[in-house]
Amino acid sequence: MAKLLLGIDIGTSACKVAAFDTDGTVVYQANAPYKVYYPSSGWAEQDADEWWEAIAGAVKEVISNGKINAEDIAGIGVDGQSWSAIPVDKDIKPLDRTPIWMDTRARDICERVKTEVGEDNIFNIAGNDFLPSYSTPKMLWFKEEKPEIYKNTYKFLQSNSYIVYKLTGELSQDRIQGYGLHLVNMNTLDYDDMMAETLVLSIVQVPELFNCDETVGTVTKEAAEKTGLKAGTPVVAGGLDAASGTLGAGVYKTGDTQEQGGQAGGMSICTDSALAHKKLILSAHVVPGKYLLQGGSVGGGGTLKWFKQEFGGESSFDELTALAEKVPAGSDGVIFLPYMSGERSPIWDPDAKGVYYGLSFDKTKGHMIRATLEGVAYSLEHNLRTAYETGIEVGRMNAMGGAANSRLWTQIKADVTGKTIQVPASDTASTLGAALLAGVGCGIYKDYDEAVNSTIKITRVQEPDMKAHELYKKRMELYLELYDDLKATFAKYN
């Protein structure tokens, strides 16, 4: 009997592929990088076929190096980065690169549409503001700026739906990634014909909707030859990487909260209704009947990766954070605004820039590193404070992503937010979540209670230092004030 599950995660800088036993143990995992293209200011693109080549190679590596019999894989789940808009023709070949979640080229379109259609009219249906990062404005951008491509576009696909197609030959649109399409009613999780017509788009431009754990198709002979998988292996629709990672971090019940420390940062609060806030992100959870009120920030683990690349020399991440550990909480007054590619929630400012404030001759590399870690924690707290405006409550948070491997960074987040943070197997949260979707969809687990209880293990718990929390509350006010003071300057000199 097949006993393994395969999870595929389409990240921003690389894909991750992992095979799991039914108890959540990683049998083997691999990753493969690909490029982000920045052809113009505010643009960020990726090539969907480069995703596929990387994923196919990583799957083959997992099967080969993990000495896995492909027949033992019971099902495959795919999660992916948000807000793609991959234009494909009738042969399902990409006609152009897709703008990704960091891309803000459609900002002028957004302002015009909100004026013409009415910001509240869109929000009341979609549960999300009409912002350039989302998929729908990018579809309109293709329509207005590349009409020939738009004319020849058969469907617009999401990151995971494209990879599911490459595996199965079947088109799909999972209901979770539908939150990036303002054509989806967030209360019913079905397409809204009237909103599509209002936005001068059509639901025929997007595929049929599937639940995240619903089987779309099975691995084709062609995909099997390329990846080493067995033809006929079931593939479920999958969903958003943050939502999949939220499940993989053990967050699936109302009130549970995930803290994200991947390339990007943010949080996801599990609710039982479509609780929306204009400055945050609302999506359904990959777990049926649940929703996620999310904060998604540009500055996550990628900020330290950038610092290491530009200023770290030969130092490892551990060596850099060791320098930061020698600096007291609050970084002796150094504050970092982590807006390295504009910022998403809760400020939604494509002009925002990264800033170090408080530098002087007595400051060291360690001060700048600690300020970087603290700046990301401040952005998390900013999103949480915004969520509290809805009346929601947050207890403990479960951390995911590579940043959760750092005890120092996790402690800083606990101290800034005043919340206890639990750390599951952070490196595999997204791929594990995708695998659990396949496990439920294929009947390996009877439900999500069994799936989570069988696989999620907390590796450590970090309690907040409330004395440090009081200091960070004061620093947080400076963090917010700096952005308010610089906002007009960012826009003026963009």
Image (cartoon, rainbow, N blue to C red):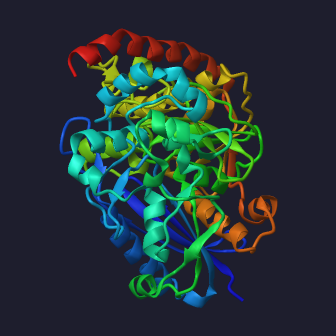
Specify whether 327 is left or right of 38.
right
Q: Nearer the viewer, residue 436 or 367?
A: 436
- Is residue 359 something one can see in this rendering? yes
Q: In the rendered view, would you say 468 is above or below 246?
A: above
- Which quarter of the rendering shows the C terminus? top left
At x 64%, y 56%, the residue is 248
Identify the image quadrant of the N terminus: bottom right
Picture residue at 35% right of the left edge, 67% below the top? 90
Question: Residue 60's spot in the image, x, y percent?
Answer: 43, 81
Q: Indicate left or right for 349 with 25 as reference.
A: left
For residue 281, what is the image quadrant?
Answer: top right
Q: 9 or 237: nearer the eye?
A: 237
Residue 443 is left or right of residue 123, and the answer is right
**Can the viewer see residue 314?**
no
The vertical placement of 445 against 191, above or below, is below
At 28% across and 52% down in the image, what residue appears?
151
Q: Foreground residue, 448 or 207?
A: 207
Give x and y (percent) for residue 205.
43, 53
Quadrant of res 269: top right
> Can you give x and y, in whole percent of width and height, for residue 57 in the image?
38, 77
Percent position of residue 175, x then y: 60, 52
Number of on-image labels: 0
Write the residue at 45% across / 17% down: 479
